[in-house]
Amino acid sequence: MNNRSNRNRGFSLLEMMIALTVGALLILISYNVLTSQKKAGEAQNQLVSAQQNASVSLEALTRDLRLAGMNIDDFNKQPVFVDAAPYQVIFNADVSSGPFGVPSMSVSQTAPLSSGVFYSPGDYPGENIGTRERYNNGAETIRYTFDRDANGLVNSSDRYTETQNPADYALMREENGTRIDMIAYGLRGRENYPDGQLPEPLFKYYGDFNNDGVIRLYGDANNDGALSQAEIAALTRVPQNLLSKIIEVSVGIEAESPNMEASYVGPHSTTGSERRYRSIVMTSKIRPRNVGTGSVNLHACGDPPASPTGLSGVDTPRDAGESITLTFTKSVDETAGEKDIENYTVYRRKEGQVEWTCINSATPSGAATYTIHDDSHTPGGGPVIDTPYYYMATSWDCRPQESNPSNMVGPLRALPNGPQPPVIESAFDTP
């Protein structure tokens, strides 16, 4: 009887309390694990979002900046860089070449500079837009900026306010003064961190700013190769007269998570002002095209080369009016001074026209004089019979820089003046 009673009795109060306690502990542990996993997942999502924004921004900037100076109108002095500031860069490049490419910027279009004024082709000294509407060669004007309100100035009014992060800025891309796309948001602008530290600028510029053949970082007053907090605070846009000295552009993208993470305390935090946004930094130093090849060549190139001299031209004798023969004396920089002439170029225009066309070039060979023909093999074809033309020549160095034009000759006309001389295919002693 007692044995049957012991087998049928239930849990004691102590056993139930132990079971409930163990169950509660298991539930609490499971909850903490799930919560931790959820927080880790949210943190990972925030970091992925920042990483994507940084990667997309860097890819776009790298692609376009590498082409800076490509197919610009050198003859009419179209600049490579138009504006170079900590959070904005404007440059000319033929990034949309092809049958449906975008033409160069017209004089009726404007792009806001970081100084707050507006640029259009021909505004800079030396630019030769003349009476034309736009430059030749189809190099459009590209602008990357944090300037959302399109006034040229990058300040707190340009913040990207569609996220929680008060330090968010958006990278905008424009062509010829027209806004094309927002590349990415969630990028840190010039706002201080909570601890008062200033972020690195989006763009840093390297070049031979002192004309001594040494590549330096613009704004690096003590020449230590980096920007201190004081130097960042004093950083300005590269002055217009130094834009042509830029050799490399360093892009530093700091992307931050769009949403605050309550349990995260990041760098640059202070008591009561925690920086609760995940961040990632991506950098790349980009050497654009057509702006030089390094300090050694820069030192060799130096100033723009001396012009060729003594250009003369005649209707090529004994032809059917197909060509003009041009002769000029080499630049003195080919064998003296800088010794850096890489090629000579000859330009032609019709009488009554303004535009000059590049028709032919010659590689230096050490000769005292050079002869170049304007014939049917030159770009655009040879001269039209009995049409007056004018010619001039220039020299180019390794930067590349173009000399001032030589003297101009003309009008010259290609006229039929006899048959071509016979071509001797074989010869032998007369028997």
Image (cartoon, rainbow, N blue to C red):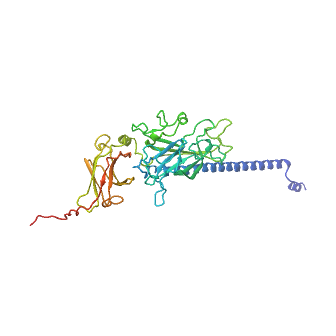
Residue 161, position in %: x, y?
Answer: 65, 46
Q: Classify residue 192 as left or right of residue 124.
A: right
The reply, left or right, for residue 58 in relation to residue 77 is right
Outermost residue to the left: 431
Q: Is residue 343 visible?
A: no
Report whether residue 83 is seen. yes
Indicate the quadrant containing the N terminus: top left, top right, bottom left or bottom right.
bottom right
Q: Return the residue found at the far right.
A: 1
Judged left or right of residue 65, residue 339 is: left
Front position in the image: 388 or 218 = 388
In percent of width and height, residue 23 lies at 77, 50
Identity of the residue drawn at 60% across and 41% down: 155
Quarter the C terminus occupies: bottom left
For this rendering, which residue is in front, 9 or 328?
328
Please name the residue shown 32% across and 52% down the image.
391
Front residue (pair 274, 110): 110
Q: Nearer the viewer, residue 345 or 69?
A: 345
Residue 185: percent from left, percent from top:
60, 49
Q: Is residue 164 above or below residue 351?
A: above
Q: Is residue 260 left or right of residue 363?
A: right
Q: How many numbered marks, from 0 up?
A: 0
Taking the spot 70% from the left edge, 49% from the top edge, the residue there is 33
Vertical placement of 417 versus 298: above or below?
A: below
Which residue is farthest bottom?
A: 431
Q: Which image quadrant is residue 209 in?
A: top left
Q: Position of residue 150 (x, y in %)?
A: 58, 47
